[in-house]
Image (tube, helix red, strand yellow):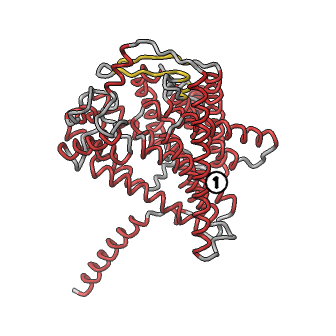
């Protein structure tokens, strides 16, 4: 009997350190998401995500039944309500494919209930170590991606890859597109810009979390940040540029305004600090755009990209053209999505699996063809309205407001040390940058942009847990829930007093 129990214990220990290991799963899913962002892998293997989601479900169920992990859901009411709303939306609207609906729902579970709660049972030092490992791993991985991108650029590679989605044809270029845009191994300049921006953010967070920073670490950090900054500029991705400098402005303002030297000053000093931070970020963004345009101009003049007479390219171009001033079509996508949501189900939405078909039902007459952008609103909030209606949008906004209010109150605390402010500012740098990308490109629905989704919720959960460990659970209580609870408490107390009088 003792031999059997020891064997069982050994097997369980091995499983917990391999298949059921949360950290291993986190790193594995990040690697998988990065690989899925490479062309032609991304466009031909989008359905394999369900196997990864099944892995996550096994980990969650094991944790629930064995009580190995103490689930601490800060803001859990909004997340659970959102999942319930998604389920009701599926029941009301139906699903074209049950496996697709389950995969979408499972992805939300992974984001909210696994990555958001990752390591919430750790102490403060262990949490910092975990975040340092994840940010360092992401920094090294994406720095390598940038180096490969520059190698493709230096050698003038322009490898076309044509993919037929069935209802639309898309042309990707690995290296340099025929317009001279820098696409890297992703085959998409926007995605390359997002990854470079993410690498910059992770490098900054890694440097902040390092206790000892020798010359080698500083050298790597500076080289990585410079390479990632140049890569963002060369990609000419407006979303990546706005996200990088917008996130830097938010983090820099909070760090400087609430430092001990400025927090006690009067409001004109704080206003001047805010203006100075914004001006510095605008100047850096202008310099970045100038570097990007100048370099891309040299590339267009000196590198011959394969043009060819490919008819598929002409089909691609005509499918993505719009009449009038809406050349990019993003405003048309948003307006059509809102129209579809208004006419179909503005309260609960149409559901993520139904979004492309519902969008095509309301496409404008001057929309030439059925592109792969159908159902993609290029804006997180508009996407939520189409997929999950006003109810889903409200719940997500309440959850984000809870997280923002916790962070804002944490910066006001007098015992917040300079190191605490640095770590929280670096985490907010990433959270703000990923959130701003979602305002121009809805990263939550791109299978090949899940890397940003995962880090967004991982950093968000890490920030809330760090605040709780640093300042106590009182610092992360929901102010809205507290007000609602106080109302119910007063009513209950009033009923008890009325009962006593009678």
Taking depth in this image into account, of 87 and 369 the one nearest to the observer is 369
**Residue at the far right in the pictured view:** 215
- The quarter of the picture where residue 343 lies is top left
- Seen from this angle, which residue lies furthest bottom? 501
Residue 122 is situated, as x and y percent measured from the top left of the image, at 60, 49
Q: Residues within 10 Å of mark 1 (few under 14, many from 20)?
A: many
Check the image and report above or below for 131 versus 192: below
Residue 85 pos. (x, y %):
29, 47
Is residue 5 visible in the rendered image? The answer is no
Residue at left 61%, top 24%? 153
Residue found 65% across the figure and 59% down from its top: 420
Q: Position of residue 290 (x, y in %)?
A: 59, 41
What residue is shown at x 57% (from left), y 52% (from top)? 282
**Above or below for 256 versus 380:** below
The one nearer the camera, 14 or 151, is 151
Which of the two residues, 268 or 489, is positioned nearer the viewer here? 268
Is the residue 452 above or below the residue 274 in the image?
above
Q: Is residue 494 visible in this depiction of the protein? A: yes
Q: Is residue 149 left or right of 330 when viewed as pictured?
A: right
- From the image, which quarter does the C terminus lie in? bottom left
Q: Is residue 151 left or right of residue 461?
A: right
Image point (53%, 63%), residue name: 408
Residue hosting label 1: 423
The picture quadrant where one finds residue 57 is top left
Residue 409 in percent (x, y) is at: 53, 66
């Amino acid at each position: 009997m003792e031999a059997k129990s020891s064997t069982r214990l050994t097997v369980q220990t091995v499983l917990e350190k391999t298949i059921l290991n949360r950290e291993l799963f986190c790193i594995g899913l990040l690697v998988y998401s990065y690989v899925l962002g490479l062309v032609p892998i991304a466009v031909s293997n989008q359905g394999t995500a369900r196997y990864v989601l099944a892995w996550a479900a096994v980990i969650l169920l094991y944790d629930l039944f064995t009580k190995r992990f103490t689930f601490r859901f800060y803001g859990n009411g909004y997340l659970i309500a959102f999942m319930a709303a998604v389920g009701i939306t599926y029941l009301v609207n139906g699903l074209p494919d049950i496996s697709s609906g389950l995969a979408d729902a499972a992805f939300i579970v992974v984001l909210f209930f696994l990555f958001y709660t990752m390591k919430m049972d750790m102490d403060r030092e262990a949490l910092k170590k975990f975040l340092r490992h994840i940010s360092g791993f992401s920094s090294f991985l994406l720095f390598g991606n940038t180096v490969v991108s520059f190698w493709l650029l230096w050698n003038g590679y322009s490898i076309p890859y044509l993919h037929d989605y069935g209802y639309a044809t898309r042309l990707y270029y690995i290296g340099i597109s025929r317009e001279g845009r820098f696409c890297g191994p992703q085959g998409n300049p926007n995605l390359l810009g997002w990854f470079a921006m993410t690498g910059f953010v992770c490098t900054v967070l890694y440097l902040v979390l390092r206790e000892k920073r020798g010359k080698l670490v500083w050298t790597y950090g500076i080289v990585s940040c410079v390479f990632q900054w140049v890569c963002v500029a060369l990609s000419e991705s407006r979303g990546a540029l706005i996200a990088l400098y917008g996130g830097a402005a938010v983090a820099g303002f909070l760090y400087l305004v609430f430092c001990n030297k400025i927090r006690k000053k009067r409001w004109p000093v704080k206003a001047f600090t805010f203006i100075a931070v914004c001006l510095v970020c605008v100047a850096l963004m202008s310099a970045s755009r100038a570097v990007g345009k100048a370099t891309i101009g040299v590339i267009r003049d000196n590198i011959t990209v394969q043009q060819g007479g490919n008819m598929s390219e002409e089909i691609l171009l005509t499918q993505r053209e719009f009449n009038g001033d809406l050349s990019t079509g993003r405003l048309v996508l948003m307006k059509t999505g809102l129209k579809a949501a208004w006419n179909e189900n503005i309260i609960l939405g149409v559901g993520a699996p139904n979004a492309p078909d519902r969008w095509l039902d309301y496409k404008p007459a001057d929309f030439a063809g059925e592109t792969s952008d159908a159902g993609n609103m290029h804006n997180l909030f508009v996407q939520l309205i189409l997929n999950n209606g006003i109810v889903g949008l409200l719940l997500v906004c309440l959850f984000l407001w809870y997280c923002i209010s916790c962070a804002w109150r944490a910066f006001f605390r007098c015992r917040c040390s300079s190191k605490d402010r640095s770590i929280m500012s670096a985490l907010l740098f990433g959270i703000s940058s990923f959130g701003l990308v979602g305002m121009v490109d809805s990263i939550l629905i791109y299978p090949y942009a899940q890397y940003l989704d995962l880090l967004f919720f991982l950093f968000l959960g890490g920030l809330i847990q760090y605040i709780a460990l640093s300042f106590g659970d009182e610092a992360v209580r929901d102010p809205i829930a507290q007000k609602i609870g106080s109302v119910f408490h007063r009513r209950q107390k009033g009923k008890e007093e009325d009962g006593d009088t009678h």
